[in-house]
Every structure is written in C-alpha cells, then in structure tokens.
Image (tube, rainbow, N blue to C red):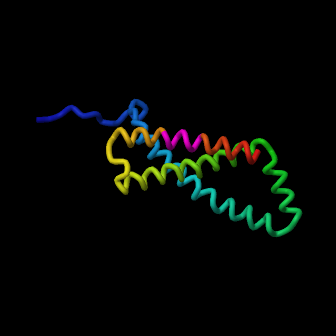
Amino acid sequence: MQKKRPIHLALHKIRLPLPGVVSIFHRISGLLLFLALPFFLVLLQNSLSSEETYSELMDFFGMPLAKIGLFGLLWALLFHTCAGLRYLAIDTHLLSNLKQARESSKVVLLASFLLTFLIGVRLW
C-alpha cells in the first residue's frame, strides 16, 4: 500500500493555529532578546564611561527611528514574558484543555500589545 505523499511542503499554504503562532513568536522574541543583549551591554558601558558619550547616546535614542527600534525590543520583552507565563501555566496544568490554550494565546497577544502601548506612551 503506497500513499501518494507530497515531495515538498508548501509552507505558504500551511495555516497554523494561534497557539502555534504564539509558540513561534515566543522563540523569535527570545532569540531577538538574546542577540540584543550584547548591544545593550556595550551601550551601558559607553553611557557610564563619560558625560559626552551619555549625551550622545541620549541624542541618538531621541531620534524617532531609534525609538521605534526600542519599542520593537520592548514588545519582544513583554511578549516573551507573557508567553513564558502562559507556558508556565500550561506546564503546571492550570491550562489543561484546547479551549484554554487558544484563549490564553489571545490573552498573551493582547496583553503584550497593550503593555507595550502603555509603557511606550509613558516613555515617549
């Protein structure tokens, strides 16, 4: 009995459920935060070295494009935190069925965008 199977997957035709999308974004946001960490450590070192470098960094981060980049990293941090709490709840069996998993993934997306907006408005 031979089944006719596809030779390759058409990835653009695969539609993941929302918990799958949240899982992929959780991994991407973690990678983004990991890769940004050395950059921020260098910025911290430079900001503490002298008053001139601190004022140059403040001028740089006052530009709109730099602020947008920081908002992206802020969203990655907040999303990764919310999704991590969701996975902790799943691992401790607080979220045990499929409906709760789908609803919690909606909550993660909504909470991360809402927290980013609130903190971003405060920091802008």
The quarter of the rendered structure image containing the C terminus is top right
Identity of the residue drawn at 50% across and 45% down: 25
Q: Residue 50: percent from the left, percent from the top?
A: 86, 68
Q: Is residue 10 left or right of residue 6?
A: right
Q: Is residue 104 left or right of residue 57?
A: left
Residue positioned most to the front: 94
Q: Which residues are magenta?
A: 107-113
Identity of the residue drawn at 55% across and 48% down: 79
Q: Residue 56: percent from the left, percent from the top?
A: 85, 56
Dominant secondary-structure state across the stretch colored magenta: helix
Magenta stretch contains residue 112: yes
Q: Residue 17: percent from the left, percent from the top?
A: 39, 36
Residue positioned most to the top: 13
Q: Residue 23: percent from the left, percent from the top?
A: 44, 46
Magenta stretch contains residue 54: no
Q: Is residue 121 left or right of residue 113?
A: right
